[in-house]
Amino acid sequence: MLKPDDNALRPDISQLRIAPQDKEARPAGKWVFFISGAVVLLIAAGVFLYFFQEPVATIKAAVAEGIEPGREHTILNASGYVTPRRRATIAAKITGQIVEMRVEEGMRVEKGEVLARFDDVNIKAMIRTLEAEVEAAEAAIAEINVNLRNAERNLSRSQSLHQTGIITAKDLDDAKTLFDGTAAKLKLAQKQIEVSRNRLAEMKQELANYTITAPFAGIVVSKDAQVGEIVSPVSAGGGFTRTGIATIVDMESLEIEVDINESFIAKVKIGQKVTAILDAYPDWRIPARVRTIIPSADRQKATVKVRIAFEALSPKILPDMGVKVAFMEAAAEPQINGNSVRIPLEAVRRDGAQSVVFIYKNNRLESRAVKSGPSNAQFIEIQAGILAGEQVAVGNLANLQDGQKARLAGGN
């Protein structure tokens, strides 16, 4: 039996080779090492900067305003509204239907000018009836006067005849009675015609109430009724009856009304100068003065109402406009140092008895001790230590330090 050849069964591995590696691919491990090292360095740098870099404070700043000797300055600020002293919603004394309306919003009217007319057909008919009654009474009086003169003549003749004995005393008494009765009728007729004339005058006055006129000159700011509507001095008809015809404002009586906290009312005096700025015209400074201080406080709001009169009115000033006011006060006497400035009260930090401010300059803070002067609710006068135009930090100053880096809030 033939045996298989062992060499024929053994696999031939003489052709197998290990491919040589590319020399350029070998440094891949080095790049991984370099990248890992760079990441570690960046993290270390970030940690270092986070814990060891100089802190930068974010602040708000205000500019120091120079105060000239004797110059007026603001001691109190408030806000309010423009209000007229004379403002009226015109109503009627009677209830009636409008048949004519002569005004529109924005129209200027003069005192006594007709605004509207009511339906007056019925009252005119009543007036004509009363006029006829007066005429009839006058005619009746004329007839009674004729009868009275005739009775007077009869009485005179009867007296003469009675003296001669031609007529009896009874006849004389009858003549006298007729005369006295006619005189009494005349007095009654005179009283009746007086009543009729008074009623006629009353109706004519009532007729005048059917014409609505302006009580003063002004501008119509609201037209409250239309032709055909019923107007009444009192509300009636379930809300379908108007109580007003139009609203008129005397534009010459415009003034400012503000509420002042009672803690600061002592700073306000009658005649004090005020600068007003309308919300609609923020660049327009309007001179004004305190006209009156209402002698009553509001216990709910702890405020006192103050009325301020404009020194000059303008067509741009309209009722109910929002307005901000600054109460001014002149310096009592010139300051020895002409470098006094005014800064917000919140720009000063108290370190014991010393007043300190932080000047913002070249992105750093500089701590300065200053000499402070008078103050109000918002501002304080600095008499030494700051120059006009320098920027001071305002707000929370507790954590600020001299020489600290800083940036303005909202800036880069």
Image (tube, rainbow, N blue to C red):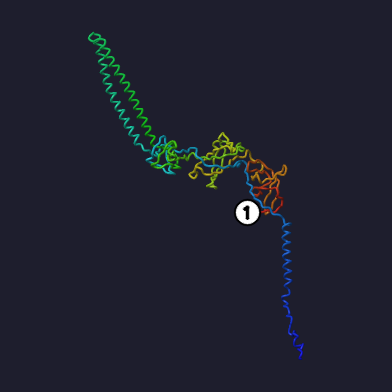
Q: Name which quarter of the figure residue 178 lies in.
A: top left
Q: Residues within 10 Å of mark 1 (few under 14, many from 20)?
A: few
Which amino acid is tagged 1?
Answer: Gly
- Rendered location of residue 30, percent (x, y): 74, 71
Q: Name which quarter of the figure residue 98 lies in.
A: top left
- Residue 406's place in the image compared with 11, above or below, is above
Determine the residue positioned at 64% across, 52% down.
409
Q: How many marks?
A: 1
Image quadrant occupied by the N terminus: bottom right
Q: Is label 1 in a helix, a strand or a loop?
A: loop
- Rendered location of residue 401, percent (x, y): 71, 50
Residue at the outermost bottom position: 1
- Rendered location of residue 243, percent (x, y): 44, 38
Image quadrant occupied by the C terminus: bottom right
Name the residue beneath numbered marker 1. Answer: 410
Determine the residue positioned at 36% across, 28% down.
199
Residue at the outermost left position: 166
Q: Name which quarter of the figure residue 192 lies in.
A: top left
Viewer-proximal residue, 1 or 7? 1
Viewer-proximal residue, 138 or 338? 138
- Rendered location of residue 312, percent (x, y): 51, 41
Viewer-proximal residue, 69 or 245? 245
